[in-house]
Amino acid sequence: MRWLRGALVVIIFSAFLIIFAAAAATGLAETCKPTESDMLGPFYKSGAPVRSAVGKGYIMTGIVKSAKDCSAIKGARIEFWLVNPEGTYDDDHRATVFSDATGSYRFESNMPKPYFGRPPHIHIRVSAEGHETLVTQHYPEQGKTRSPFDLVLVPSR
Ligand SMILES: [Fe+2]
């Protein structure tokens, strides 16, 4: 009967290992879940100047990553546009930022105002080689002056 007990211990141990591995894999997948896309809206213009700030008061930082394997994407083109402090879109509140060698970016702006009944938001468009272009929006939380916001791209087929 000793072999039976031994076998039982091995089976239970294996089951725990499988559950643990599955949980770890799920956690990993979550960190590289593609960033949800959102409306482009009518105010996008291509060719915004390369600059890391268009105002003061709100800072976004993050890493551009591939949903394929969570790897950082360097040189991704990130375009930002948002309303000016008066609440309207203009060319002074558009920027292009490139992710650095570690995939990181930093962008500073004024805190966007709500307009047309929409909550405050910053528009973002990200393009990188080998990946689908991501169009999304970031919604600053009230009272916060900075926020981490990773941008996870879907590999192109
Ligand atoms: Fe908008």
Image (spheres, helix red, strand yellow):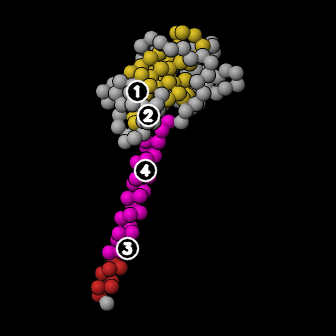
State how far apart marks 3 and 1 are (Cα).
Answer: 46 Å
Give the residue at mark 2: 156
Give the residue at mark 4: 27
| In this view, 1 is above or below 126 | below
State how far apart marks 1 and 4 are (Cα).
Answer: 25 Å
Q: Nearer the viewer, mark 2 or mark 4?
A: 2
Q: Where residue 21 sits in the image (x, y, percent)?
A: 38, 58
Which residue type carries mark 4?
Gly
The label shown at residue 12 is: 3
The residue lying at 49 percent from left, 29 percent from top is: 134
Q: Of callouts 3 and 2, which one flags the residue occurring earlier in the amino acid sequence?
A: 3
Give the image quarter of residue 121.
top right
State how far apart marks 2 and 4 are (Cα).
Answer: 23 Å
Q: Of callouts 3 and 1, which one flags the residue occurring earlier in the amino acid sequence?
A: 3
Secondary structure mostly seen in the magenta stretch: helix
Which residue type carries mark 3?
Ile
Q: Where residue 27 sits in the image (x, y, percent)?
A: 43, 50
Q: Nearer the viewer, mark 3 or mark 1?
A: 1
Q: Where residue 150 sits in the image (x, y, percent)?
A: 44, 33
State how far apart marks 3 and 4 are (Cα).
Answer: 23 Å
Give the residue at mark 1: 128
Which residue type carries mark 1?
Ala
Which residue type carries mark 2?
Ser
| In this view, 40 is above or below 2 | above
Point out the stretch of residues depicted in magenta: 10-35
Instruction: State whether label 3 is within 8 Å of ligand 1.
Output: no
Q: Quadrant of the C terminus?
A: top left
Disc 1: CA contacts within 10 A as few (<14), some (14-19) or many (>=20): many
Disc 2: CA contacts within 10 A as few (<14), some (14-19) or many (>=20): few
